[in-house]
Image: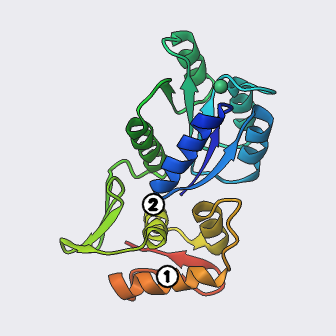
């Protein structure tokens, strides 16, 4: 899953990007409202973390403009005790908010929930045939037995599972699993798919030749 973090405090931005990458997300960063809006309009992010007080264009303006074209889930970071900010954010089309300072674990949990909700999968564990995909522990088990997946294999399984029954194109896989600085070669997706099949069964991921991949569930 790919996230955009828009935050002008360099230390906080660094921490947010680093910890979200540790959680397995591909993360793009923007340090002001203009850059944030440009990236948010350019890529199909799974969720955006958007600070309210930003140079060039504040979080409200970014959100209002973004909502003209994209429904990307947005979590806003607001100032302490600013009830008016939170009300304004939710009324402007924000999906959730956190008050600074916040615990990183809470941010991570809220992002997971946002992504699941926007994919129409409100439960944290997605069950497909005899496989259980736990989006909180980022692990997969089959008939109760834990399956060891790499971070990228897990990310691929989660993306397909969140879109179960829908064709997921190679372009979607690139957009959602790699950040803007990633220059992985296209054939790597095939390698990851092949490895997942070895671990979860050869029919777990179905190839639609020339189109993409699908998990039927
Ligand atoms: Ca700020």
- Residue at image position (43%, 50%) is 116
User: Which of the pair 144/117 is nearer the observer?
Assistant: 144
Q: Residue furthest toward the front?
A: 11
Location of residue 197 by image quarter: bottom left
Residue 41 image position (x, y, % from top left): 75, 46
Q: Residues within 10 Å of mark 1 (few under 14, many from 20)?
A: some
Q: Secondary structure at mark 1?
A: helix
Mark nearer the viewer, 1 or 2: 1
Q: In which quadrant of the rendered image does the C terminus lie?
A: bottom left
Location of residue 145 by image quarter: bottom left
Q: Secondary structure at mark 2?
A: helix
Question: Which callout, 1 or 2, points at the residue further toward the start of the chain?
Answer: 2
Q: Residues within 10 Å of mark 2 (few under 14, many from 20)?
A: many
Ligand 1 within 8 Å of disc 2? The answer is no
The Cα–Cα distance between marks 1 and 2, rounded to whole angstroms, is 16 Å
108 vs 38, left or right, is left
Residue 16 image position (x, y, % from top left): 54, 42
User: Which of the pair 51/101 is nearer the observer?
Assistant: 101
- Evaluate whether residue 201 shows in this view: no
131 vs 94, left or right, is left
Q: Which residue is mark 2?
A: 162
Residue 207 to residue 78: above or below: below
- Residue at image position (66%, 54%) is 44
Q: Which residue is mark 1?
A: 193
Residue 42 image position (x, y, % from top left): 76, 51
- Evaluate whether residue 31 shows in this view: yes
Tell me, what colour scheme is on the image?
Answer: rainbow
Q: Which mark is residue 170?
A: none
User: Which of the pair 71/26 is nearer the observer?
Assistant: 26
Where in the image, quadrant-wise, is ligand 1 located?
top right
């Amino acid at each position: 899953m790919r996230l955009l973090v828009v935050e002008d405090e360099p230390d906080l931005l660094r921490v947010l990007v680093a910890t979200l990458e540790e959680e397995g997300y591909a993360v793009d960063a923007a340090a002001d409202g203009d850059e944030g809006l440009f990236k948010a309009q350019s890529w199909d992010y799974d969720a955006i973390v958007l600070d309210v007080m930003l140079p060039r264009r504040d979080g409200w303006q970014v959100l209002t403009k973004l909502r003209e074209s994209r429904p990307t889930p947005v979590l806003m970071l607001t100032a302490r005790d600013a009830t008016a900010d939170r009300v304004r954010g939710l009324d402007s089309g924000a999906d959730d908010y956190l008050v600074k300072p916040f615990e990183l674990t809470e941010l991570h949990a809220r992002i997971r929930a946002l992504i699941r909700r926007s994919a129409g999968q409100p439960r944290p564990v997605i069950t497909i045939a005899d496989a259980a995909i736990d989006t909180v522990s980022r692990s997969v088990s089959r008939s109760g037995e834990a399956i060891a997946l790499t971070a990228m294999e897990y990310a691929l399984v989660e993306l397909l599972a969140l879109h179960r029954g829908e064709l997921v194109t190679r372009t979607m896989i690139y957009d959602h699993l790699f950040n803007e600085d990633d220059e992985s070669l296209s054939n790597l997706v095939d390698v990851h798919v092949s490895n997942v099949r070895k671990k979860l069964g050869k029919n777990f991921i179905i190839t639609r030749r020339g189109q993409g991949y699908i998990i039927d569930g």
